[in-house]
Image (cartoon, rainbow, N blue to C red):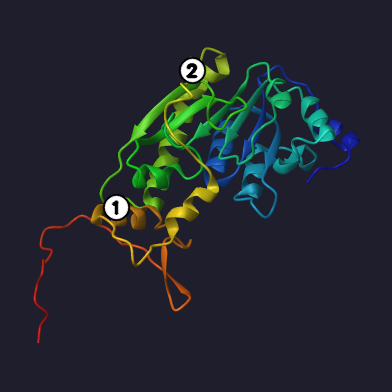
Amino acid sequence: MDSAPSAWRRFCPRSRPRLRILYFGNNRLGWRAAAWLRAQGAEIAGVAVHPPSRARFAEEIIDAAGVDRACVFDGSTLRQSDVRSRLQELHAELGVSVSFGYLLPKTLLDAFPAGCINLHTGYLPYNRGAYPNVWSIVEGTPAGVTLHYLDEGVDTGAIVARREVAVEPVDTGRSLFEKLEEAALRLFQETWPAIASGSAPRAAQNPSEGSTHRVADVARIDEIDLDRAYRAGELLDLLRARTFPPHAGAFFRVGGRRVFVSVDLRYDEPGDAVNEEPLA
């Protein structure tokens, strides 16, 4: 995605007095936030996206940001010295990270005069890291969304704003993910004026509070042990948390093969028959 530095300088000039943004994005939320920023007249000087094997909505993010291909960076290369140099020459004042899966090096974070903000679909300090929608259901921790400043840790920077999202009995990992995505975008839109003006508050997190999960952590809950005793609520929460079609989720093994399990949950409606005997 990166091209020669000469082409990069030609297409990424420092020309306007508006707050210049370096955007780090992935997934549909990353696309929607980039499109909204551009619609507000924000100046996005460059974009970093995931490499093709990990990218989601990368092309949409690039198009929404309105940057030339010479200003698009592979997010997995940000620690390389030549890439860092090119990023710093963009003279971006603010970093904006949305659903971006790579930790930003301190040298890059320090280069932003206005700091770097991150939109996280977890209610910090709970569920730092990966799959906050899953762990809010499995562990019963508060679900929500947070806008915070980035530091060298995983979602440990000072909080700007956060909003709790209710977890309903009929929620699955997918439905809660979608609710969190909508809430995150609204929080970002409402908080952006304070970020852009430099008046956003900063509330430090207590590193001893909350919880953190990595991508690999779901592997330890995905396999259902048919010889283990589960509480009904525990098993149901595990199954609904890992229901996210079309992705595989929880499973058990029979004869060496995995059998995947998902659940379909809904509230009862007037007129629903309960325990009705089948017709002959």
For the residue carrying disc 2, how many other residues have a C-alpha within 10 Å: few (<14), some (14-19), or many (20+)? few
Amino acid at the residue labelled 1: Glu
The front one of 65 and 167 is 167
Q: Residue 234 got which mark? A: 1
Residue sitting at 35 percent across and 53 percent down? 172
For the residue carrying disc 1, how many other residues have a C-alpha within 10 Å: few (<14), some (14-19), or many (20+)? few
When asked about the image quadrant of residue 235, the answer is: bottom left
Q: Residue 95 got which mark? A: none
Which of the two discs, 2 and 1, labels the residue nearer the N terminus? 2
The front one of 146 and 206 is 206
Left or right of 265 on screen, residue 16: right
Quadrant for the C terminus in the image? bottom left
Residue sitting at 37 percent across and 50 percent down? 175
Q: Secondary structure at mark 2?
A: loop
The front one of 274 and 127 is 127
Left or right of 15 on screen, residue 236: left
Residue sitting at 54 percent across and 34 percent down? 36
Q: Position of residue 101 (x, y in %)?
A: 60, 41
Q: Position of residue 202 (x, y in %)?
A: 50, 16
When asked about the image quadrant of residue 163, the answer is: top left
Q: CA distance from mark 2 to mark 1?
A: 33 Å
Q: Secondary structure at mark 1?
A: helix
Left or right of 42 on screen, residue 124: left
Amino acid at the residue labelled 2: Ala
Image height of 253 relative to 155, above or below: below
Q: Position of residue 179 (x, y in %)?
A: 38, 43
Image height of 220 relative to 280, above or below: above
Q: Position of residue 43 (x, y in %)?
A: 66, 27
Eye-nearest disc, 2 or 1: 1
Disc 2 target residue: 204
